[in-house]
Image: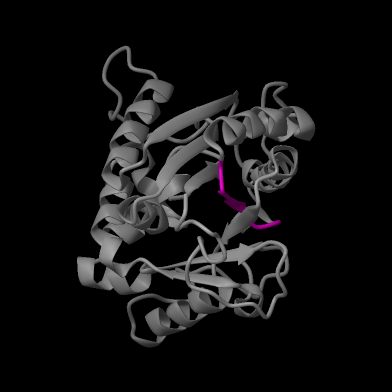
Amino acid sequence: MATLVAFHAHPDDECLTTGGTLARAVDDGHRVVVVYATRGEVGEVPDGLLTPGESLIERRLAEVTRSTAALGVHRVEFLGYRDSGMAGTPDNDHPSAFWQADVDEAAGRLAAILGEEGGDVLVAYDQNGNYGHPDHVQVHRVGVRAAELAGTPHVLEATINRDAVRAFVDHMVSSGDATWDDVPDLDDPDLVFGMPDDVITTRVDVRPWAERKLAAMRAHESQVGDLAPFLAMPVDVFRETMGTEYFIRRGVPSTHRDDDIFAGLDILTR
């Protein structure tokens, strides 16, 4: 079967856009490797969550272990860079920040893992890093370059379907479950959020793996503030709302459509 390497910026990023796809790939018999650029040391943490003497990094590494176990991931690696924080913050300028890393040097670290694993498919992020976070944008740049260095044949950009989110937001407001003050303004030209539906090539149905995706998200207790809206959903609502994951397959026309990140691989003889 094939080997999938999923490249992410921080612990918990593996869940939202790729958790179901990773679990599905494992169940289909593929080898799945998750690589993080950073350990997420700049992430916020709820008061009182850490035990005396426990660092945020220690907690986030433990959360990674639980999350990737829920998904069935076979190997986890870290490239060793520092979390760059949100755009415009002083953490962006730290000399060890992933955002400051030389792209070729960082890509070489990822390419080494791709080479060790004989990676068939690499998943990174879209060119805007899904929502403009510096580390997410850098994941796109480094991931694309690493695939070139390693000769990885299939590269997909995990993304958010902006039009699907718009439809969901409209439904929430019209049903009275939210107000316009509660939801992002997707028409704001300064808000970089996902990609339009017409450039998304690959839509993966992960509804049968929704419970495992949810379990992986719940493992990241330190990030509950970011994940709370999703964790509060009833399972059946979560399954339908979060049950499709979206990708842009590099090297194909924007009109290409498929429903499997392994589409086009000759994996039956591997």
Q: Which residue is pictured at 34% across the width and 56% down the height? A: 28
**Residue lying at the far bottom of the rendered structure:** 174
89 sits to left or right of 261: right
Q: Position of residue 42 (x, y in %)?
A: 53, 30
**Residue lying at the far top of the rendered structure:** 53
80 sits to left or right of 46: right
Of 206 and 270, nearer the camera is 270
Q: Is residue 58 visible?
A: yes
Residue 6 drawn above or below residue 163: above
Q: Position of residue 200 (x, y in %)?
A: 61, 72
Q: Position of residue 37 (x, y in %)?
A: 58, 33
Q: Position of residue 223 (x, y in %)?
A: 38, 42
Q: How many marks?
A: 0
Image quadrant where residue 177 sits: bottom left
Residue 120 inside the magenta-drawn segment: yes
Residue 91 drawn above or below residue 13: above
Image quadrant where residue 208 sits: bottom left
- The magenta-colored residue range is 119-127
Residue 112 inside the magenta-drawn segment: no
Residue 105 drawn above or below residue 74: above
Of 43 and 123, nearer the camera is 123
Q: Which residue is pictured at 48% across the width and 72% down the height? A: 259
Of 73 and 162, nearer the camera is 73
Q: Is residue 92 visible?
A: no
Of 123 and 63, nearer the camera is 123
Residue 119 drawn above or below residue 113: below
